[in-house]
Each structure stands twice: as structure tokens, then as C-alpha cells.
Image (cartoon, rainbow, N blue to C red):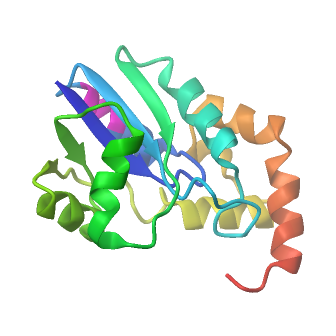
Amino acid sequence: MRGFYIGRFQPYHDGHHRMVAEIAEEVDELVIGVGSAGDSHTTRNPFTAGERVMMVTKALKELDITTYVVPIEDLDRNAVWASHVRSMTPQFDVAYSNNPLVVRLFEEAGVDVRQSHMFQREVLEGTEIRERLTTGGDWESLVPDAVADTIREVDGVERIRKISNTDTSE
């Protein structure tokens, strides 16, 4: 059975990683959708799709599951979003999400959707990690080592700090 899990992964963090590890116990293969693939260089979406693909791919090397990491650009037409996702990914049997809109859109499209509990959501969320990246707080303990390495490799800390000084629209 092949599963599908989508997120913006700005950045991919330990909460995502724990959810993927749980999903890996239920499926043989996993398609990871990197959502909002066209967005980058803003305070809400500082990393490019390619950088996020690197983060996820490197972090998942330690898990014993076949994965496919696929960038998914936004489609501002919710009624056809699920078919758009299916057109961009390998076929999957079940989708995993805790996002109410994603759950609804997949269910309306006849996709089996499963949810899981969130892990330390008060800390393990992109907004908190991006804030720590901006202010010099401890962000590295909240992401897999491979993700921290990737953020450093792309000079992500400096990027988000510079963006936060100029980007007031988000």
C-alpha cells in the first residue's frame, strides 16, 4: 500500500518526522508532497521547493521505507485540488493529513484519509521554528540533523533574518 502525506515543510521538523515514522508503519511506500512549491523567500515560506525536497529526502534516509518526494504547486481552485495532486504524484491508496481543508478535499474526491495526533504542536510548528531562526533562538533541536545541515548549507538562517527585516506583507 502506498500513502501520501503533504505539508509545506517550512522547514521539515521533528513533528513531521514523527508523523512520517508512524505512517511508515502502515504503508509500504510513501509519497511526500511538498506543498506551496512555488513559494519561497518570504517569512512564511523562506525555503524553495528544491531546498525542502533536500531537507525531506535527507531526513528520510534513516527510515526503512521507499519514499517519493514531489513538489506540488498551489492551485487556487479547491474543487479540483485533489485531482491536481493526483496528477502530480505516483498513485496512492491513502492520504494522511490533520489539515481540515486537505481532509475535506480528499474525502470529497473519494480518497481514504487518515489522521494522527500531533506531536508537541506548541513547539513543533513551522511558525515557532521560523521565529527562532529569525531571532537566534534554539531551532536546531526541533529539526532532524539532516534538516539543520541543509538549512546551514543554503544559508537559510541569514536568508530568513534578512527577509524578516524587509518582508512586512506576511
Numbered marks: total: 0
Indicate the position of residue 157 as horizontal and vertical percent values: 81, 53
Q: Position of residue 55 (x, y in %)?
A: 61, 35
Residue at the far top in the pictured view: 64
Q: Which residues are magenta?
A: 20-24
Give the residue at x 34% y 17%.
65
Q: Would you place residue 154 above or below residue 161 in this image?
A: above
Give whichever of 77, 122 is nearer the camera.
77
Residue 6 appears at what percent x and percent y? Answer: 39, 49
Q: Say above or below: 135 vs 38.
A: below
* Left or right of residue 84, residue 27 in this image: left
Q: Main secondary structure of the magenta part?
A: helix
Q: Quadrant of residue 102?
A: bottom left
Q: Does 22 lie within the magenta span? A: yes
Rendered-image quadrant of the N terminus: top left
Q: As drawn, is 128 to the left or to the right of 24?
A: right
